[in-house]
Structures are given as C-alpha cells and as structure tokens.
Image (tube, grey):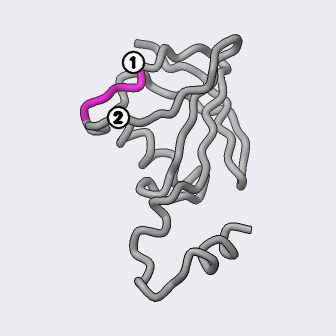
Amino acid sequence: MADVPLLVISDNSSSERRITPSWTISQLRTKLEPVTGIPPSAQRMTYRAPGRDAVPVEAHDEDATFMSSFGLVPYAELHVSLGLGAFENIRPWVTGAYISSLCL
C-alpha cells in the first residue's frame, strides 16, 4: 500500500505527514511522539476525512489494528491531543482540581 498524506494537528504543531496504512495504531503513536511532543500512552487521536464524522483512532488491541482499517483518505485530518492517559501515574493525593489546573 502506498503512503497516505494526512494533516497531523496537535496543540504544538500542524504538518503534513505520510502515514503508511500497514502501520498499527501503536506504531503510529510512537512515530507521532517526536512530532507532537505527546507520549504514545497519553495521545488521544481522532481521524476526520472530508464529508465524514470524526472517529477516534483506538482499538482493543492497538498492536494488531492497522491504520488501513480507518479508510485513510489523502489530506484528511488526524487530530492528536493530550488524553487522560497523561495522568495515569499521578500520586493519589493529587486532586481533580489540580489536574484541571494543569490542563488550562
């Protein structure tokens, strides 16, 4: 399969990237870390093709789910944001209000 150019958008950057449909979701997350600055475990990804609703890029087994299953279309948008996984290792004494203040 040929690579598909997508517009990868995050809070830190926006750029065109070539995505290989045979990559797994896990592989894509790893490749996007240097681009977005968001660690793979903290990424929340959403794919939006023109004329279609946005769909979350996630699966039960992200090591076995290929990007081709999302019907990649050239120049569609892949939004990458900081998900709740970023706060998995926070100490129990940290309150939700504190976490919210970090996100502002």
Q: Secondary structure at mark 2?
A: loop
Please tell me whether mark 1 sits on a helix, a strand or a loop.
helix
Residue 33, how many percent across, how many down? 51, 53
Q: Which amino acid, by three-letter code, is at mark 2? A: Ala
Of the 4 image quadrants, the one containing the C terminus is bottom right
Above or below, 22 relative to 87: above
Determine contact: label 2, label 1, CB under 8 Å. Answer: yes
The residue under label 2 is: 59
Crowding at dot 1, Cα within 10 Å, few <14 / some 14-19 / many 20+, comes out as few
Identify whether 79 is placed above or below 35. Answer: above
- Identify which residue is drawn at 57% across, 74% down: 96
Residue at coordinates 46% horizontally, 88% vertically from top-left?
93
Read off the residue under disc 1. Answer: 69
- Magenta residues span 64-68
Frontmost residue, 35 versus 44: 44
Question: Is 9 situated left or right of 83 in this image?
Answer: right
Magenta run includes residue 66: yes
